[in-house]
Each structure stands twice: as C-alpha cells, then as structure tokens.
C-alpha cells in the first residue's frame, strides 16, 4: 500500500484559547496529532492497529512554526502526510490552513515504535514498512541535530503527574509536557510575546505518581528560551525544548 495525505477539519473551541482569544499551541498540536491518527487509521497503522500487535506509536520530536494563531470559532484544516523514513525514525509533516487556504502554521515530527510490554523501542515492524512512503507535498526539513543545553534555569516549577495527564500509552501525554514547559516561562513573556517556533524532543517517559521538574532559561538571543523537564525521583531528563518568541506584539 502507498501512503497518501490526510485532511482533517476542526473548529477552535472556547476551552482551547488564551486571553487573546487565540488557540494555544498545545491545542493545535493536539489537532495535528488527531489528524495523524485519522490518516494512519485509513492506512491501517493507527495506534489501535499497533496495540493489537503489542506495539504503539511514540512521538520522539516535533518542530512547529506558527505564522498566525486561529481564533475562537475559526475553522481550520490540518493536512498531514508521511514525509520520510530513516532507519527506526518515521517522519510526518503537517500544515494548518484556514478555510480560505491561508497557511497558519506547519510542523515536522519524528515517530518511533515501542513494545508496550517491555517499554522498549523496537525496529519498525514489517506491516508498517509495507506502507510505501509517498509524500503528498515537498517534505519539510527533518528535525535533526542537538538543541542547545539549558545552562542556568531562570524559573522552575514542580508538576505532579496526575490521572488526567496520562494517555493511552499509560504515560504523560506529550502535549502536557509542552504545556508544562510553556507554563514555566515568566509571566511577562507569556503576556507580551507571541510564540513563533518550538522544537521539542521527548527523551523518556513519566508515569502516574511521578513529579516532573520543569526548568527554563534564556538562550543565545533575547527571543529564545531553553527548556528542560526532569524526573524529580531519578533526575532523568524527560524533555528538552527550544522556543522562539516574537518581540513585536
């Protein structure tokens, strides 16, 4: 079977907006993941299909660039397609449009396959490899390379992992990590600046009962912040991220 692009339609809801009346980035990432789910379902390789065989999808990295945030009640279309394959890494791209085809944002992502019993990453199973990758559009540059390390935390918060933070894989859902990273930023950044880009790497899982420590500090430029999320009990790094903020708002 050849892969083909998927198209999903959403309307921004009131519980997904910030004080400006715009969709939050975690909400938009959730829409992108829902669109990916629908596309993989149609290809016969959805998370449910994998779970029946003892496997599951795991998001390893995502880089998002936003040009404009949709507002409450605005209808959007998310287009997504499998954009490439490298050894154990499967790449998937996204573009978000208005109903008038205005490009609001775009993202590229990296996915891995995990054994749900052993909680270990595995080689891509044959039934997934049999789906030929045929990008629907010109692929975005793959999310590769290391991110700058956070050297000195400017702010930090502790986040207990609670029941509603857990997803189908029985670990903290990736959009919650993104939310925690953003929530740790100074209030003046959240109020006065607009998030333009995020590059986030998911390194390890956290489960119910853990406590996650979210740290953030300034990057090499005034518009850049570096993020790190750690397990309080093991000191293991769970997430690393870089965010870029617009100074003109």
Image (spheres, helix red, strand yellow):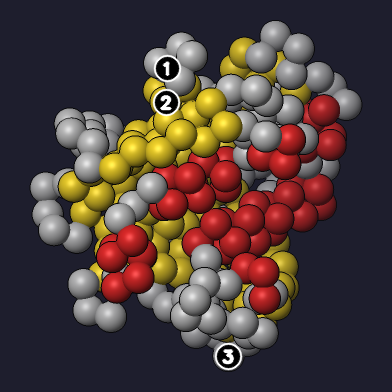
Residue 230's tag is 2
Density class for disc 3 (Cα within 10 Å; few <14, some 14-19, many ≥20) is: few
Circle 3 — which element? loop
Density class for disc 2 (Cα within 10 Å; few <14, some 14-19, many ≥20) is: many
Relative height, residue 90 to residue 186 (above, below): above
24, 110: nearer the viewer: 24
Distance between mark 2 and mark 3 Cα atoms: 42 Å
Q: Which residue is mark 3?
A: 100
Distance between mark 1 and mark 3 Cα atoms: 45 Å
Earlier residue among tags 2 and 1: 2
Point out the residue furthest to the right here.
Answer: 52
Q: In this image, 188 relative to 151: left or right?
A: right
Tell me where residue 235 sits by quadrant: top left
Circle 1 — which element? loop
Point out the residue furthest to the top here.
Answer: 118
Circles 2, 1 touching at the beta carbon (< 8 Å) = yes
x 53%, y 26%: residue: 211
Relative height, residue 16 to residue 240 (above, below): below
For the C terminus, give its image quadrant.
bottom left
Relative height, residue 34 to residue 55 (above, below): below
Please say whether residue 85 is visible from this viewpoint: no
Density class for disc 1 (Cα within 10 Å; few <14, some 14-19, many ≥20) is: some
Q: Which residue is mark 1?
A: 236
């Amino acid at each position: 079977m050849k892969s083909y692009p998927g198209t999903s339609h959403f309307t921004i809801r009131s519980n997904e907006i910030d004080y400006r009346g715009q969709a939050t980035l975690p909400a938009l990432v959730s829409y992108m993941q829902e669109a990916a789910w629908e596309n993989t379902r149609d290809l016969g390789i959805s998370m449910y299909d994998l779970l029946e065989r003892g496997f599951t999808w795991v998001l390893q990295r995502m880089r998002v660039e936003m040009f404009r945030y949709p507002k409450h009640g605005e209808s959007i279309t998310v287009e997504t397609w499998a954009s490439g394959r490298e050894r154990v890494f499967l790449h998937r791209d996204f573009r978000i449009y208005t109903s008038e085809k205005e490009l609001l944002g775009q993202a590229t992502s990296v996915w891995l396959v995990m054994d749900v019993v052993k909680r270990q990453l595995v080689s891509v199973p044959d039934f997934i490899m049999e789906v030929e990758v045929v990008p629907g559009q010109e692929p975005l540059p793959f999310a590769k390379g290391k991110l700058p390390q956070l050297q000195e935390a400017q702010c930090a918060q502790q986040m207990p992992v609670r029941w509603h933070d857990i997803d189908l894989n029985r670990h903290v859902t990736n959009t919650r990590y993104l939310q925690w990273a953003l929530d740790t930023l100074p209030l003046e950044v959240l109020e006065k600046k607009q998030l333009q880009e995020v590059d986030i790497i998911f390194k390890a899982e956290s489960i119910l009962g853990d406590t996650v420590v979210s740290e953030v500090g300034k990057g090499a430029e005034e518009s850049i912040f570096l993020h790190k999320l750690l397990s309080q009990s093991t000191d293991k790094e769970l997430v690393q991220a870089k965010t870029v903020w617009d100074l003109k708002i």
